[in-house]
Image (spheres, coloured by chain):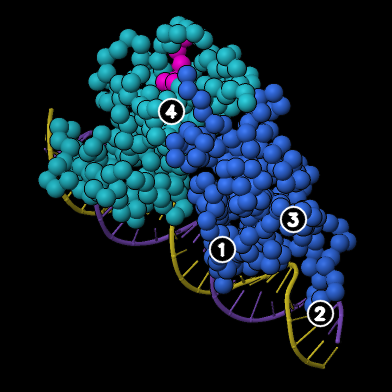
Chain colours: A cyan, B blue, C yellow, D purple
Amino acid sequence: MESVICTVDVVLLTLREGNLYVALLLRDKAPFQGAWALPGGYVHVEADEDAEQAAGRVLEEKAGIVSPYLEQLATFSGRARDPRGWSVSISYYALVPSAVIERVERSDLRLVAVDQLKNLPFDHLNIVRAALERVRSKSSYSSLPVYLCSEQFTLPQLQTVYEAILKEPINKVSFRRKMEELGILEPVLGAVETGKANRPAQYYRLKAQYRHTLSQTGRGLNPGS
Amino acid sequence: MESVICTVDVVLLTLREGNLYVALLLRDKAPFQGAWALPGGYVHVEADEDAEQAAGRVLEEKAGIVSPYLEQLATFSGRARDPRGWSVSISYYALVPSAVIERVERSDLRLVAVDQLKNLPFDHLNIVRAALERVRSKSSYSSLPVYLCSEQFTLPQLQTVYEAILKEPINKVSFRRKMEELGILEPVLGAVETGKANRPAQYYRLKAQYRHTLSQTGRGLNPGS
DNA sequence: ACAATAGTGTCTCTTAGACAATATCGA
DNA sequence: TCGATATTGTCTAAGAGACACTATTGT
C-alpha cells in the first residue's frame, strides 16, 4: 500500500487590541524552510494516543504553549498540498489569552493579524480561513470567546471580545441578558475593576464546571446599538 | 517514520417511514470479516485527488451509490480504534433519498434504523453518532433535509422529513414562512400531488442554482404546534 | 354534501433592540 | 460637582407560534 504523510496543524488564535492574531512558527526544515507557517508536525504513533494529543504535543513542543481549548477543525488532504507527496493534515484550532503567548519569548514564534496574512506555505491560508469561519460562527451562539480572555474579566471587556470576533457591535442589554441566560459566569465577589474614572465594573469568571467545556445559547448574539 | 493507516468512512443516511437509516456493508475481509460496518476503505494515493474524492469513490465502488451531498464530518484517529494499528479515518456523511439505496439490489448492503444500531466494528458507532448530531444540528438552520427527498416533494412532505430528523413537531405556518424566506425552492408549475381525498399539494423542487449547495436560515426552525 | 388535508390570514406572545434612568468611580 | 462608563429598568418592534378560516380534492 502507498504511504500517506500524516500530520497535524494547529491554528492558535489570540486577541490583541481588538484584533485576532494567529501564531506562526519559523520553519527550520524543508519544505518551506525559512517560511512562517502554522505549528504542525507528524503524528508520532509511539507517542500520540490520537490526533488531538498529537496536536497538543506539537503545540507544546514547537510553540511552548498549552492551550485549555483545542478543538478539531477539519482535515485537509490531497496530492497537491505538500510537495513531499499525498498528505493529510488533521487541523485543530486553539484559543488562548494573548498573555499566554507573550509569555513565550522566542524569535521563531510570531503573531500576525489574521487580516494581514499572505503567502503561507502549504494550504495553511485555507486552514486559517476555515478556523476563522468556525470561530466566528461558533462565537455567535456559544461562550467560545471566553477562552480569549484571561481568567477574570468584566462584562464590557468580554463584549468587546465578541465584537472583535464578530466584527459587529452588539446591543449591551442583549449581551448581558444572553450572558445571564447562559449561566456560565459567576461574579468574583468583591473584585471590581478600579482605576478608571467611572463606576467600577464587576469581574466575572467561568464557573468551575464550565472551565473546560463550552456552552451554547439558544439563538445567538445579534448586532445591536 | 512510522506508518499510519489512512482510511475514509462514509455515513450514508436516508429516511424511510419517518426514521433515519444508515447504510451498512458486510465486510468481506479482516479485520471484522463478516461484520456489518460503514462503507470505508483506504485512501488510494494514485487514484484519489483528496480524501473527499476517496470517500466518493469508496461509496460508489463499495455501495454502488453516488451521493449529491457529501460533506466532511470529522476525523477519528488513534492507536486503539483499528486492530491493525494506529489509524486515521477521515469520515464523511452523505444524504440520499431512500429510492437511491433501494435501487441497489445487493445482499451485502443493508439499511439499519439509527436508533437500533449496536456492536458496530471499529469506532463506527461513534462516527454514526457524530453524523446524527451534525445532521440534526445543521437541519435546524439549513436546507440540509431536502437532500433526503426525491427531486420533487410537497411542503408537507418536506416538513415531515424535518420533523423526523429533529424529532419535534414544527409549526406549519412557521415552517412555510421559513422555507419561503430561504428562497431556495420553486414550485413545479402544474405539478400537484393527486390521489388523496383532499386539496392537492403543490410540488416543489430545489432551484437549479442550489441543486448542489446548501442554504441557511437566520435562526433555525423551532418546534411548534 | 362530507371528511380530510393544503394553504393563508391574523392575533398573541416572546425576545431582541432602543432609550434612558440610576450608580459609582477619579478628577 | 463633573465627566465617564457600569448597570438596570422599560418601552417598542420583529418574529415565532396558535388559531382559525378558506380551498380543493375523493368519496
Between disc 1 and disc 3, the foreground one is: 3
The amino acid on which the numbered mark 4 sits, given as a three-letter code, is Val
Label 2 and label 4: CA atoms lie apart by: 64 Å
Dot 3 falls on a residue whose secondary structure is loop
Question: Vertically, is B2 above or below A26?
Answer: below
Label 1 and label 4: CA atoms lie apart by: 34 Å
Q: Are marks 1 and 4 in contact (CB under 8 Å)?
A: no
Whether discs 2 and 4 lie on one chain: the answer is no
Q: Which residue is mark 3?
A: B107
Query: Where is residue C27 shown, x and y percent of the image?
Result: 13, 28
Q: Which mark is residue B164?
A: none
Label 2 and label 3: CA atoms lie apart by: 39 Å
Q: Are marks 3 and 4 in contact (CB under 8 Å)?
A: no
Q: Which residue is mark 4?
A: A45
Q: Is residue A183 visible?
A: yes
Query: Split into 4 quadrants, where in the image is the N terminus of chain A?
Result: top right
What chain does mark 2 sit on? B
Between disc 2 and disc 4, the foreground one is: 4
Q: Which residue is mark 2?
A: B197
Magenta includes A36?
Answer: yes
The amino acid on which the numbered mark 2 sits, given as a three-letter code, is Ala
> Who comes first in sequence, dot 1 or dot 3?
3
Q: Residue at x 74, y 41 (%)?
A: B60
The amino acid on which the numbered mark 3 sits, given as a three-letter code, is Ser
Q: Which residue is mark 1?
A: B116
Magenta residues, start to end: A35-41
